[in-house]
Amino acid sequence: MTFTQDSTGRDSTGNARNDSRLGERTVAGRLGVSARAVQIVLGVLWILDAILQFQPKMFGTDFVSMIIAPNAAGQPAAIGSSITHMSNFLSRDVALWNTVFGLTQLAIGFGLMFRRTVRRALAVSFAWAFGVWWFGEGFGGILTGHATPFTGAPGAVVLYAVIGLLVWPRKPVNAAGPVAGGLQATPTGPEHPTAGMASSAAGRGPLGGLGGMAIWSAVWVFFAVLQFLPQNRTASWFQRMFDGAAAGQPYWYAHVLDSLGHAFTGAGTPIAVLAGAGFLVIGIGPFVSRRSDVFIVAGMVMGVVFWLTGQGLGGIMTGMGTDPNAGLLLVLLGATCMPTVLSPEREPVPIATALEHHRTWVTAGMVMLAVLPAAVATIPGAAAAVATPASNSTNGSSSGAMVMAGSSGTGASGSLTTRTEARGGVIAKSMNMSGMAGLGVTDPNWRFTGSPLPAAEVSLLTAVTSITDKGHAMQTPDCSTAPTATQVLGAVQYVQATSAAVAKYKLLSTALAAGYVPVTSTAYPVVHYVNYRYMNRADILDPTHVDSLVYAFTPQGPVLVAAMYLMPGKGQGPMPYGCLVQWHAHTNLCTSTTTHQIDGFLPCPAGSVHLGPTPYMTHVWQVPVAGGPLAIDPSDLQVVEAAIMAQQAGLAPVTAKPSSA
C-alpha cells in the first residue's frame, strides 16, 4: 500500500509515522523568525534609512548631484529625462525635500513597530518604494545593461517592498484547509507541527510559503541573467567594482577593497560565469530539494559577500549612503522564505507541489528558466564597456559639452567633450576624454593665442617637464577601456562639483588664508599648494575638501590652474569613473631639508633628500589645457600658456601689471 503524507507527519490513514526529521528546526526556526519579527526588522531598517537621510551632506547639492542625477545615465530616454527633471526640481530646495524624505521613512519605520499600524505603514512603504526605486535608484540600473547584484541590483528599496508584501498581516487560519503551496494549515503544537514551506515567515502571508519560495527563486535567477550580460563578464569588471566601492571609505576598509580588486585583476570573465552558475543553483535548489534551507543559507551568505565587497557596506561610512544597500535585504529575504521546520522526508519536493497546484505558471517559469539565462549568456562579450544611450542635458548647455567658463552641461555619451570659449574663438573643442589615457596626448586644434613667453622661461618649463616625465608612474599605465554612460555622467558631475568648490580660490590669497601651503618651490612658475587637513580617507575625491591647488604665475599674476586630489599614504586611488579619472605618482623628486619643499630631481643636490614615490594624485584642470579638465599631466609650458589664455578670456583674475620689458 502506498501512503502519502501531509505536513503534519501523518500518513494517509491518519496514523503518525516515525520520521527522523519530524519537527527538526532550521536556522530560521532556532532564531524564532516569524512574520512579526520580519516586520520589526523592516521597521528598524526604515529607521536606519531615515537616520542616513539626515546626514549633513544630504542637505546640500551633493544629494541631488551625486545620488539622484547620476541615475539618468544609460536609461531609456523617457526614464532618463524624468530623473533629470526630478533632479532639477529637487535642487531648488534640497534641504526641504530631504527633510520630507527623512520624516517619511521615519514614519514608515515606526509604523511597522506597532501591530495596529503595520498595514498602513506597509501600504505607504509600497508607494514610497516605487518612487525611490524610480528616481533614487534608477530601477537599480537594470535597464542600463551594467547592473549586477554585487553592486546592489535590483535596488535595495524594491526588496523592502517585496519582503513587506510577503509578511503582509493576514487573519489567522483557524481550521485546516488548503493554502498557497498545496500544504495544509493545521493547528500547531508538539503533535501537529506546521512544516516545510508553510512554516516560513512568508507561509502565513498573502503569497504563502510557495509564493515566498517563488520570489526567492525569481530573484536569484534574475541575478544570474544580470551576471551573464556582456558588460558584467568583461575581464576587468570585477576589479572596477572594488575600485568603485573603495571610494570615500575609511583607510583600512579601502585598503582591503583595493587589495582584493588587484588580486583579481583580469579574472572578471571566469568569476562572472561561476557567479552566474552559482546564482542559478541558489535560486533553483530550494525547489528541487527537501533541504531548501541549505540553498537559502548559501544565498544569505552571498548577500553578506555582496554587502562587504561591491556594495561597500552601502556606503554608510562615507557620509553619502542612503540605505545599507541590497546585501542585508537579501539576508532578510532569505530569513523570510526559509522554513522554520523541515518537511518530512517523504514530503514531495516543492517543484512537485507547485506543479500539482499551479501547472501552467510553473511550466512557463521552467521554460523561461531554460531559455533566458542561456540566451543572455550567448550574447558576445564586450572587450570594453561602451555605452551609447540617448543623451540628456542640464543647465541649458549642449549635451556632452562642459564649458569651463562656468555654465556646464552633462551628457551620457561615450565620450566627455570639452569646449572653452575665449576671445578669438574656440581654444579647444570636441576633446574625447576617453582617449586621454596616456602622457602627451593633446588636441591638435589646441593653440596658444597669447604673447610669447621669454625664451629662458620656455626653456626652463620644457626642461623641467622632460625630467618630471621620467619619474612619472601611472597607477593604471594601460588603462584604455572606454567609459560607460554612468562613468561619463559621473565624471562630468565630478568636474563640475570640483570646479564650483575651488572657484573661491581664484585669488591665491584666499587659498593661503584657508590653510593651503606651498610644497614645491615658489621660485618656479608652477607651484603646488597642499591643505594637510584634507588628506584623509574620509575626504578622498570630495570636492569640498580638495587636497591641493596648483597655481601658475604669469606676468599678470597667479592663476588657479588645477585642483588636485591626493591619496593619504601610499594606497591606490579609486577609479569610480573608469579611465576618465586616472592617478599618477612621481618617483624622482627631491625635497629640501630646510624648507621641506620639493626643489629638484634625482640625483638630489646638497641639502636635499630623495622624497621617494609620492602619493597618487589626480587633477581637475581649471584652465583650457589641451587634454581637457581630466588630462593626466600636460606640460608645464602648456599649463602656463593656458593660464595666460584664461586671463585673456576673463576666466582668471589679473592681479599684476605686465612688465614693460
Image: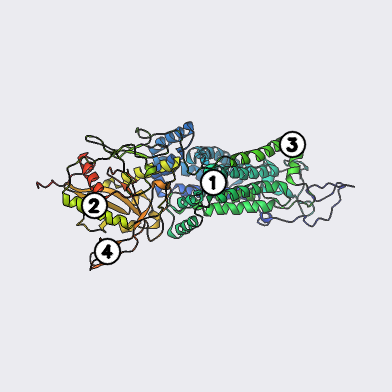
Tag 1's secondary structure? loop
- The amino acid type found where label 1 is placed reads Arg
In the rendered view, would you say 361 is above or below 566?
above
In terms of secondary structure, where does tag 3 sit?
Answer: helix
- The reply to whether callout 1 and callout 4 are in contact (CB within 8 Å) is no
Q: Nearer the viewer, mark 4 or mark 3?
A: 4
Which of the two discs, 4 and 3, labels the residue nearer the N terminus?
3
Q: Answer few, some or many: residues within 10 Å of disc 3's Cα (few below 14, many 20 plus, some between 14 and 19).
A: some
The nearer-to-camera label among 4 and 2 is: 2
Q: Which mark is residue 359?
A: 3
Q: Which residue is mark 4?
A: 591
- Packing grade of label 1 (10 A; few <14, some 14-19, many >=20) is many
> How far apart in space, not on screen, are marks 1 and 3 (Cα)?
35 Å
* Residue 518, picture quadrant: bottom left
Which comes sooner in the sequence, label 4 or label 2? 2
Q: Residue at x 59, y 44 (%)?
A: 223
Q: Which mark is residue 233?
A: 1
Q: CA distance from mark 3 to mark 2?
A: 77 Å
Please give the residue where the numbered disc 2 appears in the rendered image.
462
Q: Do the CB atoms of the residues marked 3 and 2 lie less than 8 Å apart?
A: no
Q: Residues within 10 Å of mark 2 (few under 14, many from 20)?
A: some
In-front residue for pair 220/38: 220
Which amino acid type is marked by label 2? Thr
Name the residue at the top extreme. 78
| Whole-percent x, y for residue 236 in the image | 49, 49
Q: CA distance from mark 1 to mark 4?
A: 45 Å
For the point 33% across and 64% down, which residue is it? Answer: 612
Tag 4–tag 3 contact (CB < 8 Å): no
Left or right: 127 with respect to 485?
right
Tell me, what colour scheme is on the image? rainbow
Disc 4 from disc 3: Cα separation: 77 Å
Q: Nearer the viewer, residue 412 or 468?
A: 468
